[in-house]
Structures are given as structure tokens and as C-alpha cells.
Image (cartoon, helix red, strand yellow):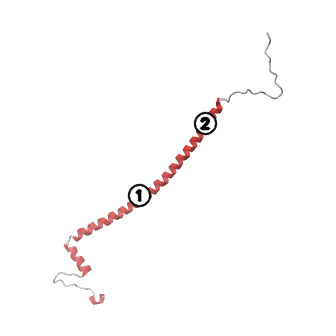
């Protein structure tokens, strides 16, 4: 029987076997693709969070402004309701007529602290 020939290795050169890429090469590529997708997704998520936070703070400021307007309107409404109740009282109507319009009941004489002619 003839022995198999043994390859002779020359100096510092080593022959590498020409084989298919190792399975690690594909795994690295998938990992890179997954990392890119994750970075893009996280970037989008952070951008959306920031935009929504800004929008929310604007809406909170608008809500506070609307609540202040509502409180002011409610106060004006309460004041007008109070005025309506007071106008139902004949005594108050008489006071308003005397002070603002100079109207007096028959037989009533106004008392002036100063001369009415001095007012003019």
C-alpha cells in the first residue's frame, strides 16, 4: 500500500481552507440589522414622547386659562343674580331711584348737604 502524500508547509505561509462563511457572520449581520431597527424605533419613541409632552403642557396651560375665564364668568353670573334678587325688593328700587335718578315719593322732601345749584 502507498502512503498518502503529506503536504509540505513552506516558511511562514499557511493555507486557509476556502469554506463557506461561518455561521457567526450571518448572526453578526442579523444583530446589526436588529440594532439599527431598535435604534430607529427608540429614536421614534423618544421623539413622539417629547412632542406629546410639549403638546400636553400647551393643553394644560390652555385649560388653566379657560378655567380662569370660567371662574370670572361664574363670578359675573353670581353678581348679576344677586342684582336681580335685589331688584325684586321695592326698598332697593326706591334707593336706586332716589340716588341715580333724583326721584322721590310724593310728599318726600330731599335733604341736601350742599346747595343743589352748587353741584351744577
Reply above or below: 107 against 4. below
| Residue on which disc 2 sits | 31
Which residue sits furthest right?
Answer: 11
Q: Which residue occupies the foreground of this view, 84 or 118?
A: 84
Percent of width and height locating residue 115: 27, 89
Q: Residue at x 46, y 57 (%)?
A: 58
Reply above or below: 107 against 34. below
Image quadrant occupied by the C terminus:
bottom left
| Residue on which disc 1 sits | 63
Does residue 10 appear to the left or right of 107 in the view shown?
Answer: right
Write down the quadrant of residue 93 in the picture: bottom left
Reply above or below: 96 against 17. below
For label 2, the crowd category at 10 Å Cα-Cα, with few meaning under 14, some 14 to 19 and many 20 or more, is: few
Image quadrant occupied by the N terminus:
top right
Does residue 2 appear to the left or right of 94 in the view shown?
Answer: right
Q: Is residue 115 visible?
A: no
Q: Which residue occupies the foreground of this view, 76 or 47?
A: 47
Q: Residue at x 49, y 52 (%)?
A: 53
Write down the quadrant of residue 87 in the picture: bottom left
Which mark is drawn over residue 92? none
Amino acid at each position: 500500500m502507498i502512503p498518502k502524500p503529506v503536504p509540505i508547509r513552506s516558511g511562514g505561509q499557511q493555507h486557509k481552507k476556502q469554506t463557506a462563511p461561518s455561521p457567526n457572520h450571518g448572526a453578526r449581520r442579523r444583530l446589526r440589522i436588529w440594532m439599527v431597527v431598535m435604534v430607529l424605533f427608540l429614536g421614534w419613541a423618544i421623539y413622539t414622547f417629547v412632542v406629546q409632552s410639549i403638546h400636553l403642557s400647551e393643553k394644560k396651560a390652555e385649560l388653566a386659562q379657560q378655567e380662569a375665564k370660567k371662574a370670572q364668568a361664574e363670578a359675573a353670573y353670581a353678581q348679576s343674580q344677586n342684582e336681580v334678587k335685589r331688584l325684586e325688593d321695592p326698598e332697593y328700587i326706591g334707593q336706586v331711584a332716589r340716588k341715580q335718578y333724583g326721584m322721590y315719593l310724593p310728599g318726600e322732601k330731599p335733604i341736601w348737604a350742599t346747595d343743589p345749584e352748587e353741584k351744577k
